[in-house]
Amino acid sequence: MSKITLHLFSFLSIMICVSASAQKLPAIQPNSIKPPANLKIDGKTNEWNNTFQAYNGNIDAFYSISNDDSNLYLVVKTKDETTAKKMIGAGIVLSITPEKNKFENGCSIGPAVNESATLTISNAYMEFKQYAGKKDRSKQADSSLTVVNKAVTTSMKEIIVAGVTGIDNVIPVYNEQGIRSAMLFDNSGALTWEFAVPLKYLKSAMGNKPSFFYNLIVRGMRNNAKSVTSRSTGVTAMVVNTPRSMGTSNQDQLMNTTDFWGEYKLAK
């Protein structure tokens, strides 16, 4: 069997396993759960044993919502490169509301996006992908993964908060309010976002009820198009500033905002 055929077979096997695992899960998490013991908000799924409560095709990601007596937790993992690029370059936001499809009286929280760092992260990620999965390039893969995750961590030093009384709209990742957010790539190239927020900040958005509606949105990237007119010909053209590693074949998908709604009742 040739190396090309072997690599293709391995890739197809992985994709079949991913597709099968996604098909077994509901699109919306059906039950309330407690978080794993000793949970750390670090962008890793070790404590979750890499298992999730749902897979939503709208955002092409696995996710789980959980709670204990003090906090609400969310973990989102995507193996789709387009979704990962949007999460890093445009943002992902969790909104908590007392009514479905209505953002009034709700609150929204998500990692602040540093658009200027998108190209650096994308280039580092593409270098990692060149080595990922190749046994003879494991050291290069590990090294490049460290580089890309350092770039992600460095770029996401703040959290955006809206609709929470007494908290500024922008707070640092390490804050006194106890709101935590972390995002990392794993060695398969999948991107995970972990998040935690104290329940006391959500009471108003929940309508002081034990259950609430939530919206999870992955924002589409802006193309940063600029109008340029030639002095010699007078012809005007649109120049799109999209990093080369973002590609152009999936430009529409990159610019497309996707989301879904669900309902969650706090676990006792």
Image: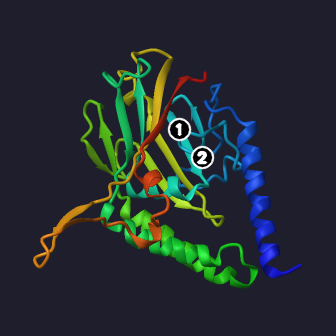
**SS at circle 2:** loop
Q: Report the front residue among 217 and 212.
A: 217
User: Which numbered dot is residue 39?
Assistant: 2
- Which badge, 2 or 1, comes first in the chain's sequence? 2
* Residue on which the image places disc 1: 73
Q: Is residue 61 left or right of residue 183?
A: right
Q: Residue at x 65, y 25 (%)?
A: 31
Q: How many callouts does the rendering have? A: 2
**What percent of the width, then of the height, locates residue 93?**
41, 41
**What percent of the width, then of the height, locates residue 239?**
27, 67
State the separation of the CA atoms marked 2 and 1.
10 Å
Q: Amino acid at mark 1?
A: Tyr
User: Which numbered dot is residue 186?
Assistant: none
How packed mark 2 is, by other alpha carbons closer than 10 Å (few <14, some 14-19, many 20 or more), is few
**What percent of the width, then of the height, locates residue 128?**
57, 75
How packed mark 1 is, by other alpha carbons closer than 10 Å (few <14, some 14-19, many 20 or more), is many
Q: Amino acid at mark 2?
A: Leu
On-image quarter of the N terminus: bottom right
Frontmost of labels 2 and 1 is 1
Q: Quadrant of residue 202?
A: top left
Q: Residue at x 40, y 51 (%)?
A: 255
Q: Residue at x 77, y 53 (%)?
A: 16
Q: Report the front residue among 86 and 252.
A: 252
Decide: marks 2, 1 in contact (CB < 8 A)? Answer: yes
Q: State the residue lying farthest toward the front.
A: 233
Does residue 154 lie above or below 107 as drawn? below
Does residue 170 lie above or below 136 as drawn? above
